[in-house]
Amino acid sequence: MVAAFLATACFGISSAHALDAATERAERDRIKAERDQAEAAYLTREHECRQRFVVTPCLDRARRDRRQSLERLRQQQEVLTKRSVSSAQRSASMRSGPRSAVTQQNCARLQRAIGTKKWSGPS
């Protein structure tokens, strides 16, 4: 627990990042489930259309609805990917960016207080 606190305090690793990763995973799973549902709905409608006398207009509507659903989900996936990339870039820049003297002093105090070796900066 102390090591986790030190990592959070000294290296900028936060539980918010882990939460973001969990939220992102849940969002990706939701999009995949909706995509699978749209495909299943299309297959059902396609089968129903083929039972009718006038097949083409029915299939056209089913294809249009499928295309619209998949496009909406593709846009959501794209937004999620962009957000994920920018979050990763921010995290990387925070880890590799220069530390202020105050942050280094705070880390040194924390480490002395719990008896660990001196902070040597990001590796």
Image: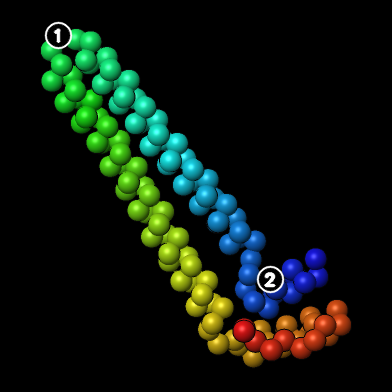
- Residue 117 image offset from top left, x and y in percent: 80, 86
- Residue 90 image offset from top left, x and y in percent: 48, 71
Query: Label 1 vs label 2: CA separation?
Result: 66 Å
Name the side, left or right, on which 41 lies relative to 58. right
Circles 1 and 2, Cβ within 8 Å, touching? The answer is no
- Residue type (three-letter) at the residue carrying disc 1: Phe
Q: What's the residue at 74%, 68% (across, down)?
A: 4
Label 1 crowd (10 A; few <14 / some 14-19 / many >=20): few
- Residue 2 image offset from top left, x and y in percent: 81, 70
> How is the rendered protein coloured?
rainbow
In what element is the residue under mark 1?
loop
Choose between 41 and 83: the one closer to the eye: 41
Q: Which residue is mark 2?
A: 8
What quarter of the picture does the C terminus occupy?
Answer: bottom right
In what element is the residue under mark 2?
helix
The total number of labels drawn is: 2
What quarter of the picture does the N terminus occupy?
Answer: bottom right
